[in-house]
Amino acid sequence: MAFPGHSEVCLSGDRLLYRPPAKAEYDGKGTYIEIDGMKTYKTGPADATTAILVIPDIFGFSAQVLQGADFLAAPGYQVFVPDVLRGQHYDPADLPPDTPEKKTKLGAFIQGPGAPPKTVALVPKVVQEIQEKAGGKIEKWGVVGLCWGAKVVSLSCGEGTPFSAAAEAHPSMVDPKDAPGITIPTCVVASGDEDANAVKSFVEALKVPSYHETFGDQVHGFMAARGDLEKEKVRAEFSRGYQIIVEFFQKYL
């Protein structure tokens, strides 16, 4: 499925895909299960009646993403992180896209396995299968999108969405035109790298309860694979960003 315009946005706009991920180590508290044929990280109490689906960035199961999932689970939520790219993660060796060959690879990724509408189509099936395996125990769902995953969230929260609240962290491909179609409370945690005007216009166009905060001294991806958690300031802001999302979900889930 083509996704017109968005490869150009990623290639030229916002510097968002120009940084490789940061190295990090973390032993997750959860386990891996299979959902819709996808390896899925599961964490949190199995008897929780509220669950959170996390759509990660293009690098897959980074230590930072797993740590973020465990943070979200700490208040008593079940959290699921499916490998929505089915192993076709973006190769950090191709960043930054500073050669014609690397730019071609990036464009092919965004138009191919990384085309957000492809993942949007997976989301209802993932939620349904988790619901079935949980035996109907899950009563409410929240959803979190990180970087690229935030675009998937924007496109998954319209009429008929299975989610009751959403959060987007340092969103890629921000389009204010997506906002009016979102039907659930939405939290936006931005970094200093995103287009500030686009983020502002997106939040202003939301017709639902919302919260927005920009971490101006943090890079795109600081709550995901680009978060250099060996740095004290980044580690503190990583935790604060996730705490904002937790408190937003405690209010609306």
Image: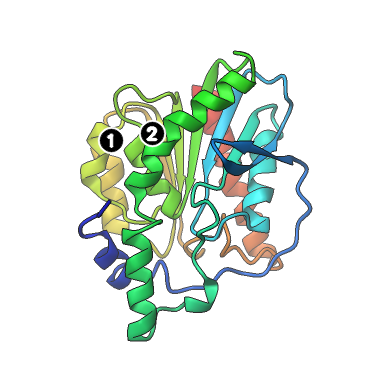
In the rendering, at what x and y percent does residue 11 appear? 31, 71
**Image height of 225 relative to 210, above or below:** below
62 horizontally vs 18: left or right: right
In the rendering, at what x and y percent does residue 165 appear? 45, 28
- Residue at image mark 2: 210
**Image height of 144 relative to 224, above or below:** above
Q: Residue at left 25%, top 32%? A: 181
Is 246 or 28 nearer to us in this picture?
28
Q: Residue at left 55%, top 15%? A: 139
Q: Residue at left 23%, top 39%? A: 205
Crowd tier of the residue under label 2, counting other residues whose Cα lies within 10 Å: few below 14, some 14–19, many 20 or above: some
Q: Residue furthest bottom?
A: 99
Q: Amino acid at mark 2?
A: Ser
C-alpha separation, residue under disc 1 versus residue under disc 2:
7 Å
In the rendering, at what x and y percent does residue 47 appear? 72, 19
**Image height of 177 relative to 53, above or below:** below
111 horizontally vs 45: left or right: left
- Residue at image mark 1: 206
Q: Residue furthest front?
A: 37
Marks 1,2: beta carbons within 8 A: yes
- In this rendering, does residue 195 appear at all? no
Q: Residue at left 28%, top 72%? A: 12
Q: Amino acid at mark 1?
A: Leu
Element type at mark 2: strand
